[in-house]
Image (spheres, grey):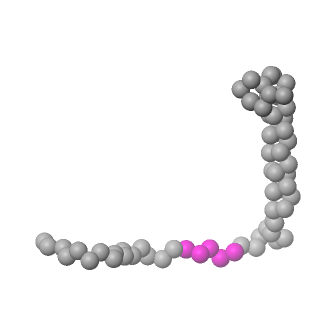
Amino acid sequence: MNHSIYSADRSTHLKIVLVALLAAIAVTSLSLSLHSYPSDPTDRRAVLRAGTPIAVSSSTIDVVR
């Protein structure tokens, strides 16, 4: 048995690709089935907006102009 992916034959590469594809489909279908959709599509949540930007500094260097 060869444990290197570099010397694997074509059928081994095909098996790896198929297993990865099936795993991706399983994760995608599981995440879509567990996603919670709102019961009322017209229900809108309040949007939290950012306030005005501020400048914060902790420098102790004196500025000479």
Residue 19 location, quadrant: top right
Residue 14 location, quadrant: top right
- Quarter of the picture holding the C terminus: bottom left
Where is 46 relative to 11, above or below? Answer: below
What residue is at 81 percent from the left and 65 percent from the top?
37
Where residue 43 sits in the image (x, y, percent)?
A: 76, 73
Where residue 49 sits in the image (x, y, percent)?
A: 55, 74
Residue 48 falls inside the magenta stretch: yes
- Quarter of the picture holding the N terminus: top right
What residue is at 81 percent from the left and 34 percent from the top?
16
Q: Is residue 5 left or right of residue 34?
A: left
| Count of residue discs | 0
Where residue 35 sits in the image (x, y, percent)?
A: 81, 62
Residue 30 location, quadrant: bottom right
Where is 32 relative to 5, above or below? Answer: below
Residue furthest front in the image? 1
In the image, the segment drawn in magenta is 45-49
Nearer to the camera, 9 or 34: 9
What residue is at 85 percent from the left and 48 percent from the top?
26
Where is 13 relative to 48, above or below? Answer: above
Q: Is residue 63 left or right of residue 39?
A: left
Where residue 17 sits in the image (x, y, percent)?
A: 80, 34
Residue 31 falls inside the magenta stretch: no
